Image (cartoon, rainbow, N blue to C red):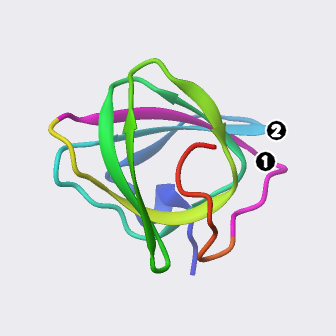
């Protein structure tokens, strides 16, 4: 079973650029939207809007409030999420091709 977010959640993730070193994904959702479990390799995340999300990994969850214009490191991880705010979520992810997906139940939920 693939955990590639573009395949597991194509209504939210799309590839906007790819080469042999990186893949750039755009993510968008609306309040109340949820994603199914998926994995990210080591990535750089840039928020295009401010948003509030609940991220789930195994039996652990974490709520995050993100401002627009934030750029940060996202360690490899597997999770699902839901928009628990009142605004749309729009994010760019620059995935490193040499980064590996995080294992199920990883402690990293969201940005480091």
Judged left or right of residue 20, residue 63 is left
Q: Position of residue 27 (x, y in %)?
A: 41, 41
Residue 21's disc is 2
Looking at the image, residue 64 lies above or below residue 61: above
**Picture mark count:** 2
Question: Earlier along the polypeptide chain: callout 2 or callout 1?
Answer: 2
Q: Residue at x 63, y 61 (%)?
A: 77
Looking at the image, residue 67 lies above or below residue 34: above
Q: Position of residue 12 (x, y in %)?
A: 35, 49
Residue 97's disc is 1
Q: Residue at x 20, y 43 (%)?
A: 85
Q: Position of residue 72 (x, y in %)?
A: 62, 31
Callout 1 environment at 10 Å: few (<14), some (14 to 19), or many (20+)? some
Q: Which residues are magenta?
A: 87-102
Cβ–Cβ under 8 Å for marks 2 and 1: yes
Q: Residue at x 48, y 62 (%)?
A: 7
SS type, badge 2: loop
């Amino acid at each position: 079973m693939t955990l590639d977010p573009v395949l597991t959640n194509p209504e939210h993730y799309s590839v906007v650029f790819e080469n042999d070193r990186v893949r750039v994904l755009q993510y968008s959702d609306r309040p109340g939207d949820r994603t199914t479990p998926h994995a990210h390799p080591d990535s750089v995340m840039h928020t295009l809007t401010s948003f509030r999300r609940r991220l789930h990994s195994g039996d652990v969850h974490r709520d995050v409030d993100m401002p627009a214009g934030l750029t940060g490191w996202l360690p490899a991880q597997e999770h699902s999420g839901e928009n628990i705010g009142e605004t749309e979520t729009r994010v760019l992810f620059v995935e490193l091709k040499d980064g590996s997906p995080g294992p199920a139940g990883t402690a990293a939920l969201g940005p480091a």
